[in-house]
Image (cartoon, rainbow, N blue to C red):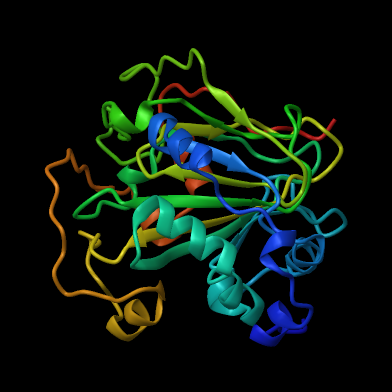
Amino acid sequence: MHHYGAASLIAAPVTRKEQSMLTDRHVAEYQTKGFAVAEGLFTEQEIGELSALTSPTPTFELEPSHAPEQPAVRRIEMPHRHFDFFREFVRHPALIDSLQKLIGPDVRVHNSKINLKPGRIGSPVEWHQDWCFYPHTNDAFLTVGVFLDDITSVNGPLLCLPGSHQGKIYDHHNPDTGYFCSAVDLDADPVNATGAEECVGPAGTVSFHHVRTMHASGPNMSAQARRLLLIGYAAADAWPLLGVRNWDQYEADMVCGRSTRNPRMVALPCPVPFPMPPEAQERFSLFDNQKRARRLLYDRPAEVN
């Protein structure tokens, strides 16, 4: 696999006039609804290069239907740690401009992944809030979703519940076992999904959703893949309550502005993703762990037709 560096991102310079930026309308929508969708932040060339770099990293996950004769990768973990192009892309000027409008001048990348959702077999993701996975000292934290394919109503779009980022923090534990199950158990804590909105658009579209926004995505019912690059970002003064394992890496993850050793504390409900089921402690999979809830929105992963 060829690695692309910073030079690739600037090899064919694109003026700001040719690319759209996040507008005041998008910012207001994000603040009110907890998510926003924008088009035109990236060029077709940039999206094409991203799409070409979806080979598995050392950490990847397979669909249940995977077989040697019909390979099916479900998720690629932390591409920005494994590919130079992604390492530079998480610092793309259009993303930095957007992030500074939404969460402030000082920003750190927290995580990245690509959910591939192959045609007909792409697994669903159940209702959840990212806040329950990543507790921080404040909630200036969001996830960017870069559409690597056209995303429509039939190939498993991201579903977001407007205003949920300003509401309750849902329990993500199985009430019978007490284990963290990475999803809202709908028997124990029903989600009123009335008004949930689909994030759809052509390849190159970008979604932004708040860390407390309730969201999910259905199975891919189409014949086409639905690849989505997800990048989590936090304000530099939002400190991870689960700790910092590698200080040098933590500092290297700054994408703009200045780091700080003085966390900003905000009074918020702050659950933690513990205890984990024994199986998840050995190898964690959000998709598999969500099946440990008693009742879910989607009964089972999509099956081959």
> In the picture, which quadrant includes the C terminus?
top right
Tell me where residue 141 appears, x and y as whole percent: 35, 52
Residue 207 visible in the picture: yes
Q: Which quadrant of the structure image shows residue 258?
A: bottom left
Residue for point 57% across, 24% down: 197
Residue depicted at x 22% and y 51%? 138
Left or right: 128 as drawn, with respect to 145: left
Closer to us: 277 or 59: 59
At x 25% / y 72%, what residue is drawn? 244
On the question of residue 59 being in view, the answer is: no
| 278 is higher (above) or lower (below) than 249 | above
- The relative height of residue 125 versus residue 242 in the rendered view (above or below) is above
Q: Where is residue 193 in the image (x, y as percent from the top left)?
A: 47, 17
Q: Residue at x 14, y 48 (%)?
A: 266
199, 31: nearer the viewer: 31
Q: Residue furthest front?
A: 17
What percent of the width, then of the height, locates residue 234? 35, 59
Left or right: 115, with 249 as reference point: right
Image position, residue 287 (x, y; %):
53, 43
The total of numbered circles placed on residues is 0
Report the side of 216 relative to 189 (left or right). right
Judged left or right of residue 81, residue 262 is: left
Task: Locate residue 28: give its quadrant.
Answer: top left
Image quadrant containing the N terminus: bottom right
